[in-house]
Image (spheres, rainbow, N blue to C red):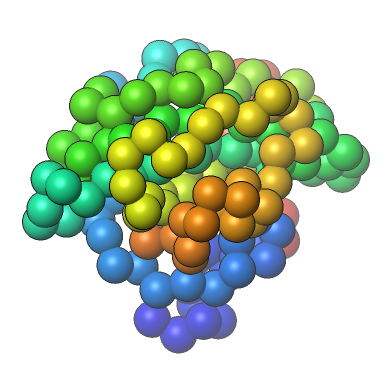
Amino acid sequence: MSRDRDPLVVGRVIGDVLNPFTRSVELRITYGNREVNNGWDFRPSQIVNQPRVDIGGDDLRTFYTLIMVDPDAPSPSDSNLREYLHWLVTDIPATTGASFGREIVCYESPRPSMGIHRLVFVLFRQLGRQTVYPPGWRQNFITRDFAELYNLGSPVAAVYFNCQRESGTGGRRL
């Protein structure tokens, strides 16, 4: 896919959260019966419970780390808490899902109060089991720095959706 049409580039996930990378593993995120696709809109009431996460791959001896962040906290015009960490699961075996991993930062349902927020799921391949540890905080989490600290390398998959408070209207303006 050309870079100018890649939804992660168009939605500024590449740049704000991640450096360019090549997707190499399937990542499927589902809230209830609705799959997350890049740029789709979800309301806070639809994402109260942690989603189902299915990860591709072909070797159960390969482990992954899943990160969920909000780069627009507390508001897109003043993202001084960028990135806010909503969920962190490690040691997820390939071909399984997050429920088979180790939740080291519990799922916190996004509740944006101002503007349209991007919620980003990022998947990294780990070097081995039990090689990733929880950060000391959720606010000002930096996915790039975290990946570097734990030698996670480039992401292998990512997907994002937009979310705004229930009474909000309109779509993301680029």
Query: Residue at left 67%, top 52%?
Result: 145
Judge by depth and name the residue closer to the eye, 141 or 13: 141
The answer to whether any part of residue 1 appears in the image is yes
In this rendered view, identify the residue nearer to me: 169 or 15.
Answer: 15
Q: Quadrant of residue 47?
A: top left
- Quarter of the rendering occupied by the C terminus: bottom right
Q: Is residue 37 visible?
A: no
In the rendered image, which quarter contains the N terminus?
A: bottom left
Residue 113 sits in which quadrant?
Answer: top right
Report the side of 125 relative to 39 (left or right). left
Q: Position of residue 155 (x, y in %)?
A: 45, 60
Q: State whether residue 174 is above or below residue 141.
A: below
**In terms of depth relative to the viewer, which is nearer, 162 or 97?**
97
For image coordinates 22% across by 27% down, the residue present is 100
Name the residue nearer the viewer: 174 or 53: 53
Q: In the rendered image of this protein, does residue 27 appear above or below residue 162?
A: below
